[in-house]
Amino acid sequence: MKSNGLCQNEKQTPQCPAHGKSGLEMVRLVMATIAAVAQAAPLPVDRELLILSEGLPPSATVQHDGEAAVVQSASGAALRVSGPASDRWPGIVLRAPTEAWDFAQYSRLVMDVRNVGNAPTRIGLRFDDQPETSPPKFRYAYKDVLPGSSEHVEVAIHSPSPTDVDGTPIELPGMWAGPWGNLPRGPAAPQQDVTRVSRILIYAGRPQDSFAFEVSNLRLTAAPVWNPPDGKPFLPFVDRFGQYVHQQWPGKMRTEADFAVRLEREKTDLALHPRPTDSNAFGGWRTGPMLEATGAFRTQKVDGKWWLVDPAGKLFFSYGITSIRLDAKKTPVTPDRDRWFRWIPAKKDPVFGAFLGPCHAWSGPYKHQKMTGFSFGQANMRRRYGTDWQPLAREMAHSRLHSWGLNTIGNWSDITMCTMQKTPYTVGFYIPTANYVGDKSDHNQRFPDVHDPSWEQGLRRVLKRWYGGTLNDPWCIGYFVDNELEFAGDVIPSGTLASPADQPAKRAFVDLLRSRHHTIDSLNAAWGTQHASWDAVCTSRELPDPERARTDFSAFLEQVAKTYFSTIKRVLREMAPGRLYLGSRFNTFNRIPATVAATYCDVVSYNLYRYPEEVAAFTFPGKQDVPLIIGEWHFGARDRGVFFPGLREARDQADRARLLMDYMRAVLAHPQFVGAHWFRYRSEPCTGRDLDGENGQLGFVDICDSPYAETVAASRTVGHTMYPFRWTGKWTPQSSAP
């Protein structure tokens, strides 16, 4: 560790006797020469793969009820793909005209698309690298395209990298996106043989309505040479404040003194923009109707629309932000990342050393590795607020929410700040358990064994130990328990059958099968299996044909869902009377768990990353008329030095602000929604958070704790109009913040 705090591990290398240079210098000289020669060679030009003037190629086939034809569009010939609503991927398959395509010299597979249908459609592009007789390795990308809109969809073949001073490519592991676009994240991506591409798929992703879109200019694009302008070296590419070096944008922090200046400027702005005048202390509709005041949040349907009602008896719509925390995410600075940063403090640094420490990843290239991480977010809050930065940052968060027109602290937030009784809040937590069904190592392919008594014990333990101060707090709206559990597909029934015989869920499933089939012969006839006895079913870990077992799989999924939701409801009623049960934040649309959740949850929650038109058309899969809440949503752009635009992309900050307002208008107009919480308060480090490398422009504030002005202005407009708009259906943006 050098005196400037940069973690360096350079070793002395012997000099070359002929040139008086070190071996390292000679290697760099040779590599630079090779790079210069390589750059002098001509790059391949873009290559068109589908000549539509010749019609559909003979090898093209449609799949899953899709249709395809060559049509004349305003810009020339286009491939029109259409089809009905489907739970599959209707579209067209284009096969290589000879044995295989060779994509090795190109960086992207790209197509231009236009949605000519009447519904938002997810339009995907994929290529496979092996014959269809083998399990293919593939890459894909998609975009959600609105009716009448045009987009281009591109799949990375190679991720173009900047080069070091010696001409060697610079790899950026552990990031979802780099300055030039998204990076491969899956472990299989590098194994794909892009010299032997067998087919290209163009499809609609499980369309909920009939669709039609037109494709033109399907092409391979040449690999660009990516380097900073003016011949500057790429490394280091992060400054001492955690900002990207090679891009400029409005509001970028320049000096240490900027933090104090920005703070005073923001204090003035907050004073000029107080909370909406029609809000009471809870953020409920002060000037709206008076209902029964129970001293706790509750739900009620009024004039055909569901609402929350605050403890004072006023109508309340929960407009919030998640992840308002002081422990801003660390980004790994080791291993192999030392040269990325212009400055990282030494551990002994009396001011900033406290923000340097161990971190961990649950996925990606650093999974299970020992890493050191640094929190630029915490360091910048220390710069901004001084030695007492923690209480001041908490106070600032409350002031911001009120001024920005928001009235709820969402999931994953600092519990100390939540219980200050200044802003209503929701609590989100996982139930700790060591017993899962499914692939226990994969967060997306496992489910807690809710038949195991230790699971309920874990629920009680976490509530009492970590959230005891919220159980009787009237400012606590309620609890989200777990997050985006894998209710979809056959994860639960298949994972249970693949479990050992002593798994409580396995025994429960076999008991259910006995009650439904009565005899082992009946089960074997239904499933096409040859189990000798019910004990053999319990000890077996082989899976039946899921289609033959479909009705039994569905019955067990329903039983698991009932056990899951009813147990949590019972425990919350006992331990936290008056607090609402807000569900598990679904991210899939399976009818069975949705129907069960509506029976037991006070409010059913979804993480709904969609465009506004899709939100407006959202139909609850359970079909019941129950209150719903959106636990997560956002939009992001790539124009402020953060490389990943989130799960829904905006063109720039102005477009992001427009999408925020349009999304909230759709939510407020929907009779079942009672709230929506933006994910998240602070944008992520541009070099990726430690957990998985996600590095999104997702926040209301950036890594330097500076608000995004366009987003704040849009949020204020929503906050000052949301109650009259939900009540009357008339949008009056002129009545927004003064």
Image: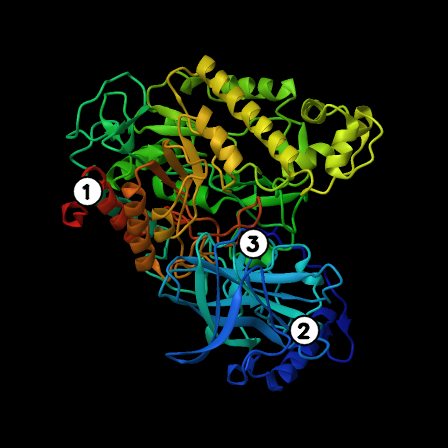
Compared to 360, does 210 lie above or below? Answer: below
Compared to 353, does 422 lie above or below? Answer: above
Residue 543 appears in view: no
Type of amino acid under label 1: His
Q: Are marks 2 and 1 in contact (CB under 8 Å)?
A: no
**Residue highlighted by disc 3:** 88
Query: Which label number is shown at residue 273?
Result: 1
Percent coordinates x, y for residue 530 in the rendering = 83, 35
Distance from disc 3 to disc 2, alpha carbons, whole Å, reads: 52 Å
Q: Who's the residue at 36% across and 29% down the image? A: 425
Type of amino acid under label 2: Arg
Compared to 708, does 235 lie above or below? Answer: below
Query: Which label number is shown at residue 28?
Result: 2
Image depth: mark 3 or mark 1 in front: 3
From the viewer's perspective, tell me whether residue 68 is left or right of residue 731.
Answer: right
Q: Are marks 3 and 1 in contact (CB under 8 Å)?
A: no
- Residue 322 location, quadrant: top left
Query: Which badge, 2 or 1, is on the more N-terminal residue?
Result: 2
Image depth: mark 2 or mark 1 in front: 1
Query: Which badge, 3 or 2, is on the more N-terminal residue?
Result: 2
Percent coordinates x, y for residue 260 in the rendering = 31, 46
Q: Nearer the viewer, residue 348 or 314?
A: 314
